[in-house]
Image (spheres, grey):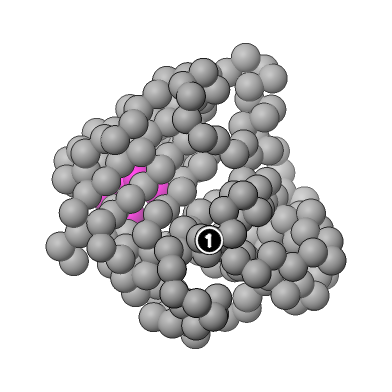
Amino acid sequence: MRLRKVANARDLLLQSKNYMEHPEEQKGAWNSVFERKGEIHLEIGTGKGDFIIAKALAHPEINFIGMEKESSVLVRAIEKLGTKEIPNLRLICYDAEKICEVFDKEITTLYLNFSDPWPKNRHAKRRLTSPGFLEKYDYIFKGENHIIQKTDNILLFAYSLEMLSQHGYTFEKVSLDLENAGIENYQTEYEKRFIELGYKINYVEAKKKNNA
């Protein structure tokens, strides 16, 4: 589906107190952004915000950051917030390729929800669980690496399990049918649609000791 551009996306984003422009300026100082110490959970590919907003509301003790590359998509998350300000949530418009410009050993959990599978082999390096991205993540985690992935794409899921294993991760939880796995779950907009169509959701929670 072609992305529908929002002409005044930046202006709309700036109207929200939950949006942060120039997040690279906060590198190494995200605890001060939230004005408290604690866990910081990051979602790459926030989309229209269903997951990260629900997660932040359900867990006020944790700080959440939603990263989305496309401003026209992130606007939809801002619209869902309306006039509501969630103190433990920040939304940023940034390319995951440059993630090390934004965080420095500050993230405790990383969510990869329904990422683009980039099915062609020549595009494999763009997958968010490719070796190149996994190396970047080593430098953003504080302490133990902790990645949680959800996808409807079984080929991407198999690829991710292989790459995570090769990169030193161990699997805490794995499911080929998340909806019936008894795991706490906050659904994305895509996820709700996939389930309605009868798709099974694949899920993995992986951890690795961080030596970076």
Name the quadrant containing residue 79: bottom right
Q: Which residue is mark 1?
A: 61
Is 181 on the left-hand or right-hand side of 79?
left
Residue 164, picture quadrant: top left
Residue 200 in view in this figure: yes
Q: Position of residue 130 (x, y in %)?
A: 31, 46
Q: Position of residue 208 (x, y in %)?
A: 22, 49
Quadrant including the C terminus: bottom left
Residue 75 screen position, x and y as percent: 75, 60
**Residue at (61% x, 64% y) in the render:** 89
Looking at the image, the residue that sits furthest to the top is: 198
Eyeballing the image, is 85 above or below 129? Answer: below
Work out whether residue 6 can be spotted.
no
Magenta residue span: 126-133
Q: Is residue 128 one of those drawn in magenta?
A: yes
Asked which secondary structure carries label 1, the reply is loop
**Image side of residue 43 versus residue 83, left or right:** left
Find residue 62 and report its horizontal and vertical position in percent. Answer: 51, 60
Q: Check the image and name the residue furthest to the front.
A: 61
The relative height of residue 204 versus residue 111 in the rendered view (above or below) is above
